[in-house]
Image (cartoon, rainbow, N blue to C red):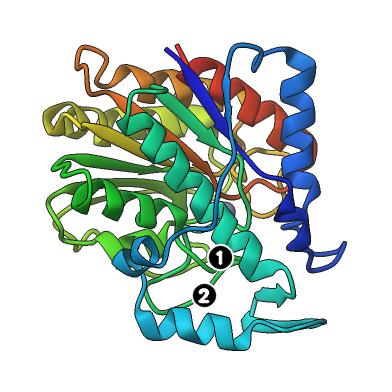
Amino acid sequence: MKLGYYSYTTHIEHDVGDIHPEHPMRIIAINHYLEQSGLMKDAYLGGCNHVAQVDLLRAHNAGYIDQLLAMSPANGMILADEDTPMAAGSLNAAYQAAGCVIEALNDLMQNKVQRAFCAVRPPGHHAESKKAMGFCFLNNVAIAAKKAQQQYGLGRIAIIDFDVHQGNGTIDILADDPAFLICSSFQHPSFPFSHWRNIYSNVINTPLNEGSFGIDMRRAVEAQWLQQLQKFKPQLTIISAGFDAHKKDHMAELQWQAEDYAWLGGFLSDINKDCKENKILAVLEGGYNLDALAESAHDFIAHFKD
Ligand SMILES: [Zn+2]
């Protein structure tokens, strides 16, 4: 399967201080690890443009986008939300991140690649239609999902979120639309403390206990997602790929290892393997221990590209 890898360098302008965990070294660490391993030698390397307003407005409220533009500081930092600082370059980086994901979606839909991984930041899955939250301004996954549905006419789009934190923003934007099947695993109880109840017609929430291991996740995923995904037959699978459930990541208390992300890569790639339309778009979300992040992202990509 042809793999596309999408990233950009100006994410470094989204710099909210060395002590903030969501910092530029995250992508630099992934890129370095992938270069060293040789995994990307045959990959198509994609860049990005700013996301177009029309793409943004399928997922986000117009007033919210105006509010982000108005609050963006010329220098220094402000808080867009209590844990979402915004520096002078943050909004530009967020627009580029969403643009990267759109570029990858376009390439998938035009069969230039069959698998795409977007190493982007700031992350997106906590951003709701009208609200910045949890280090996120624009919901990259939801923006791509809405474009796939409304511009490309897809009627079956699976959304997988295995970040340690629940993808509240994605559910806020895509809930109860039968074109989307959303499967989300997360430590519970934990941030964001919303959208975790199974009250939506198209969402499978899979809470995991603090301290639980990768094997617990694998069993839950096989029991709760596999049949539903096979029945759904996704034409496109979009993945919120967060790597902060790793045992070395102190953002939460799960005990996954790199081999669990490798398993997820293979599992998600195989779900619809007999279907020609089995396109997969993975988008970086969390992951804050640099060594664990780089190794886990590498092992995930290595198994989802085949
Ligand atoms: Zn997270």
Q: Which residue is mark 1?
A: 136
Residue in the foreground of this view, choosing between 91 and 27: 91
Residue 181 visible somewhere in the drawing: no
What residue is disc 2 on?
A: 132
Q: Can you say whether 19 is above or below 184 in the image?
A: below
Q: Position of residue 151 (x, y in %)?
A: 22, 50
Q: Is residue 144 left or right of 156 when viewed as pictured?
A: right
> Which labelled disc corresponds to residue 212?
none
The three-letter amino acid code for the residue at tag 1 is Cys
Res 88 quadrant in image: bottom right
Residue at the location (70% across, 27% down)?
Answer: 295
User: As drawn, which residue projects farthest toward the right?
Assistant: 18
Local crowd size for mark 2, using a 10 Å CA cut-off: few (<14), some (14–19), many (≥20): many
Which class describes the residues within 10 Å of circle 1: few (<14), some (14-19), or many (20+)?
many
- Which quadrant of the view contains residue 59? bottom left
> Secondary structure under badge 1?
loop
